Image (cartoon, rainbow, N blue to C red):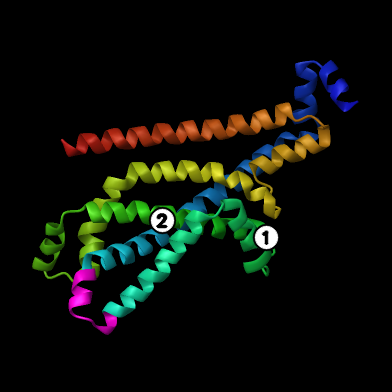
Amino acid sequence: MFRSIFLSMSFKEQFYLNFIKDERWRYLTDGLLVTLKITVVACLIGIVLGIVVAAIRSTHDKMLADIKRHPTVAGWALRVVNFFCKIYLTVIRGTPMVVQLMISYYAIFVTMTKGEYVAMIAFGINSGAYVAEIFRSGIMAIDAGQFEAGRSLGFNYLQTMRFIIIPQVIKVVLPTLMNEFIVLVKETSVAGYVAVRDLTKGGDIIRSQTYTAFLPLLAVAAIYLVIVVCLEKVEQRVERRLRRNER
């Protein structure tokens, strides 16, 4: 019955019913703010976590031969930490994001009353695994002479990474990081599984009230598309600027 009523309505009537009546458009704008908030915080968590894991993994790979030749407590500690980092990467990259989100909400962070905070942490941990591999590949691509140059300046390993290696790596992996940010924006669409009123959930609420799915879901898809297109434009400008700086 509702389907036949909907089909008999004009586009103007459908638009009014889905977005204007009872200010239903607010579900989309409020949900968009939540989506952007989750994405930005998760991205920051992912970058910090990814850099730490990447530094541990790349340090282990570069120093593995020395560790085997000259075993030390620090060397074995590095191997243990690297082992846990590998488990983290394997588990996070090998399981679906929505499952990780639900485990975080229903099993790990059960004391948190706001699903929004759980979503930030869960998406941040998930993003960190991918960012770690992006940074690790960037670090491993840096010439070994850069590390020797740091030692010749009197820097220890951490100082060399901080002042010489990481700035170069960021420049190399920035376009790939932008792509990860774009993927993260779209991944947050599953946040509604843990009672978060994000953009997708906002469209679903409108659908449940009006019993029409096409316009609310089309609006959600259009908003995501605009966000992704804008981020792609930013990524293209960043890549052009990096190419100009290399000349």
- Which residue does the image show at 61% across and 48% down from the upper left? 34
Closest to the observer, 116 or 60: 60
Residue 109 in view of the camera: no
Residue 172 placement, left or right of 101 = left
Give the main secondary structure, helix, strand or loop, of the magenta stretch. Answer: helix
Question: SS class of the residue under badge 1?
Answer: loop
For the residues bearing labels 1 and 2, Cβ distance under 8 angstroms: no
Considering the image in quadrants, where does the C terminus appear?
A: top left
The answer to whether residue 163 is seen in the rendering is yes
In the picture, measured across the screen, residue 120 lies left or right of residue 83, that is right
Res 67 → quadrant: bottom left
* Above or below: residue 187 compared with residue 163: above
Mark 1, residue position: 114
Residue type marked 2 = Ile
Q: Which residue is mark 2?
A: 47
Q: Which residues are magenta?
A: 64-74
Q: Quadrant of residue 116?
A: bottom right
